[in-house]
Image (spheres, rainbow, N blue to C red):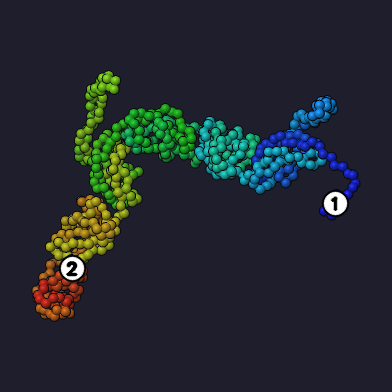
Amino acid sequence: VTHNGGAEYTSSGTLFSYWPSSEILSIDPVSGPIAGGTLVTVVGHGLRDTTRCRFGNEVVDGQHYAGVDTVYTVDRLTRQVLSNGTEVTQWTSRTRRYGVAYFICQTPASSAGHVSVQISDAFGGFGVSQDVDFQFRAPAEVYALWPRLGSTEGGAILSVAGSNLLGANRICAFGRAESITAVEISSKLILCEVPAHPEGAIEVEVSVVSGEGQQLTSSVVAFDYATPISVLGTNPAGGPEEGGTVVSVQTDSLEGSLRTFGCRFGTVAPVTARKANDNIMQCMSPARDIGATQLEVTHNGGAEYTSSGTLFSYWPSSEILSIDPVSGPIAGGTLVTVVGHGLRDTTRCRFGNEVVDGQHYAGVDTVYTVDRLTRQVLSNGTEVTQWTSRTRRYGVAYFICQTPASSAGHVSVQISDAFGGFGVSQDVDFQFRAPAEVYALWPRLGSTEGGAILSVAGSNLLGANRICAFGRAESITAVEISSKLILCEVPAHPEGAIEVEVSVVSGEGQQLTSSVVAFDYATPISVLGTNPAGGPEEGGTVVSVQTDSLEGSLRTFGCRFGTVAPVTARKANDNIMQCMSPARDIGATQLEVTHNGGA
């Protein structure tokens, strides 16, 4: 040794012995969580007395549990010919080993990453084995399972979502049942086949450490085992080819909070279903070709389906030709006339997902089949003769359905056939609108003879059939300017105040607004005289115009000098209004007056 940095060393003659290295042949598992605690089986030889493991720089005690590692020496006579031709004979020794020892070491806590693994020899020295390392990982965690429920018979494929799910020995542990080897999809998703288990809720945890299920997660995510269900009956047993039939499927008990219901029509799945009661789930048939198809159900989101062999029949579609009106308020109550064919027995309409009863009031819809003999010449010259059938229709039926309440927007309109299935017609929809409302009118007063253009200001005034209703007088079709302004020509009406309301639903004036905005009808006024009868060209003359009675609170007075209008006027008394002449060229011009703001 030295105490001066190597300038001088002792000369005691003390010896230090080197012997053959210890060696790790393998370790299992090769990874574990950063919290430590993983039991690692070390297989190796070359150990002598104590057994210790070193993970990186951390040393932990080990425990021998199996195997014997034996080292022996073999002496043998060897001959070698040198380059000068001389033959040399000598004894050589070689160390041999047979058997291996098995030790268990528990990993310490560490930061994430790879570390080398070493084992101790008799006096505590550590031998390094190439390519033997251990990976410390962030702990695995389970966030969610799909499905959340499975059959007591097992067999479903369970998707386990979480984090840090990578590992050489991934398993899923189902409560106290058998642990199942998992298939890795990514670090966030693994798949496990659900084992058989008695009915009831269990917790599913994951280990990525070893096949024995060391260090399972503790995420406490529940999985429910339930008795398999079967299909006992359906109502209706069929529907139109375009789908939309609400099918009630009678099954065994559907109790349980973790169930996710669905149907499968042939190969079309999953079709979302809802629980109607403890024995019935309901789903809507998808579109399919005409004919019978197998209907099965699931109570775990499509992971498992029944195998009852129940059939559901598809038949030719019903069809809507037109509806009127095509829009109405969100409060519902609009009477919609539906023209169509293909109906069978009952008459119902569906607006979006809301079903309402209809009433037939006119027309007959007849469906018949025509069989005809057809001939076809194939490409090879062969003539094929066969009977073909075509469905024909004549006549149409008329029904009235009242819209339900709905949120604003467009919804499809469908009609029912005999078994409650609904047929979809392309481009037939109904628009639910926010209710129209009238805020103000201009002018507020008009002549009993009518003819003025009334500006109606409000909200949600768009619609295919806008009308203005003037009290009990004739309803007038409106001209749309925007959703906030429409124009109506004022009809004739006796003198007095009325309320003007608006409908955007239909020409019959369904569902008028109830904004209670007043409009006043007054006898037309006329000019009986003026004083003075003229004034200077630069204007400024106060002209008193004698007229008929000017009584009424809704009147707005004004004058027009030729084309200059409106010129503001004031009421001097019940028969005279006054206005100031504007500047104009020299000469005579026509003077007229208004009592409704120039309308």
Q: Amino acid at mark 2?
A: Gly
The spot of residue 567 in percent (x, y) is 18, 73
Question: Residue 598: which disc?
Answer: 2
Which residue lies under the disc numbered 1? 2
Above or below — where is 389 with respect to 38?
Answer: above
Dot 2 lies on which element? Answer: loop
Q: 77 or 404: nearer the eye?
A: 77
Q: Which quadrant of the rendered structure holds the C terminus?
A: bottom left
Question: Residue 230: which disc?
Answer: none
Residue projecting furthest to the front: 84
The spot of residue 132 in percent (x, y) is 69, 38
Q: 562 or 435: nearer the eye?
A: 562
Dot 1 lies on which element? Answer: loop
Residue 67 position by quadrant:
top right
Q: Residue at x 10, y 78 (%)?
A: 533
User: How would you rate the neighbour count of disc 2 (Cα within 10 Å): few for under 14, some for 14-19, many for 20 or more?
Assistant: some
Q: Residue at x 55, y 33 (%)?
A: 193
